């Protein structure tokens, strides 16, 4: 399961067009993306306008859904969305409890216009859904990204992966092709004692996605190339996968993402996106 709350949705075709018309208030382009995998597969990303947005220091409300952060209790998400393109209801509650909270913010580009904070690099999640009827608990991760320019202006491509290393530790890799300053990589190990930067391992090419042929790559220990275990999302410009990898001398399973921004901003892809991202007038 993946949940992403957007204010100024970076992947919105409406925001993409709005910026070119001078209508660039990010509050006019908000959505909650919910992805369920497995036998009860669902996808929601209904975009709403500013009248559907409410914010306080601890709570974010987007339409009928709500996210609440409590310093002692963690993150609670009340979901009430309808899937696309098949209109299936997704309703229920997700509760995330961090094992520890990371305060460090990382800049991803040379001008510090794009920032990333892995708030809870390791956490526990409890999921209770009524629609569809599902319930489980397990390991989780929570981060946030924000920036001062469109993501496609800062980057050509990136891949990202995160692997749990036991109950409270995790490794995160960022590999970026920045539009104006070339390549940059981050290799980070998080634990309750803090964050440790380590030398980025060699980059390995992964097979392109089966349908849209999106390029994929990932860093792993020398002589231990990673393998794609499962492709979860295969879109014209973005992929999410599960990979078997080897980092810091350990065999690990990681969630992997790749993002091709030149594809995203192509007219053909922009024309296709509204079929997966409907926009409500209110």
Image (cartoon, helix red, strand yellow):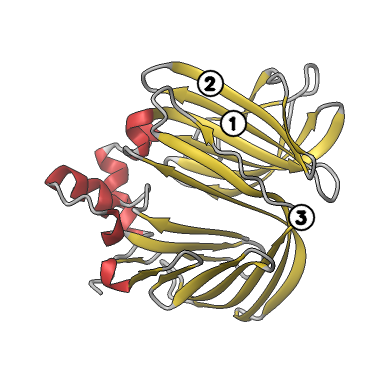
Left or right of residue 97, residue 106 in this image: left
Marks 3 and 2, how far apart in space?
A: 29 Å
Q: Nearer the viewer, mark 3 or mark 1?
A: 3
Q: Position of residue 56 (x, y in %)?
A: 43, 68
The secondary element bearing badge 1 is classed as strand
Q: Earlier in the sequence, mark 3 or mark 2?
A: 3
Q: Kindly check if marks 1 and 2 are in contact, taking CB atoms under 8 A apart as contact.
A: yes
Left or right of residue 89, residue 134 in this image: right
Residue on which disc 1 sits: 174
Could you classify mark 2 by the number of other residues whose Cα lies within 10 Å: few (under 14), some (14-19), or many (20 or more)? some
Left or right of residue 121, residue 131 in this image: left
Please name the residue shown 38% across and 33% down the image: 113
Marks 1 and 2, how far apart in space?
A: 8 Å
Please name the residue shown 43% across and 75% down the image: 87
Number of the label disc, if any, that sits on residue 184: 2
Q: Position of residue 268 (x, y in %)?
A: 28, 42
Residue on which disc 3 sits: 99
């Amino acid at each position: 399961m993946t949940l992403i709350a957007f204010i100024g949705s970076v992947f919105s075709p409406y925001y993409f067009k709005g910026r070119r018309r001078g209508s660039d208030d990010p509050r006019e382009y908000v959505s909650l993306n919910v992805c369920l995998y497995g036998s009860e597969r669902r996808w929601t990303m209904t975009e709403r306008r500013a009248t559907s947005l409410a914010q306080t220091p601890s709570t974010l409300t987007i339409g009928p859904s709500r996210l609440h952060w409590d310093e002692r209790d963690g993150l609670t998400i009340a979901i009430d969305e309808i899937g696309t393109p098949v209109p299936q209801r997704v309703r229920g509650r997700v509760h995330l409890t961090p094992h520890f909270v990371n305060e460090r913010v990382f800049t991803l580009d040379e001008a510090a216009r794009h920032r990333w904070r892995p708030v809870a690099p390791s956490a526990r999640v409890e999921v209770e859904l009524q629609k569809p009827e599902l319930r489980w608990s397990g390991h989780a991760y929570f981060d946030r990204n924000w920036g001062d320019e469109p993501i496609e202006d800062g980057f050509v491509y990136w891949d990202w992966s995160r692997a749990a290393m036991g109950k409270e530790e995790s490794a995160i890799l960022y590999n970026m092709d920045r539009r104006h300053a070339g390549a940059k990589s981050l290799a980070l190990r998080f634990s309750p004692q803090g964050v440790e930067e380590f030398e980025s391992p060699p980059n390995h090419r992964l097979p392109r996605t089966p349908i849209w042929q999106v390029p994929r790559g990932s860093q792993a220990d020398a002589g231990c190339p990673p393998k794609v275990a499962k492709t979860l999302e295969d879109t014209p410009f973005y992929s999410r996968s599960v990979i078997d990898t080897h980092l810091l001398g350990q065999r690990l399973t990681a969630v992997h993402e790749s993002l091709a921004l030149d594809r995203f901003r192509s007219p053909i892809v922009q024309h296709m996106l509204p079929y997966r991202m409907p926009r409500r007038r209110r």
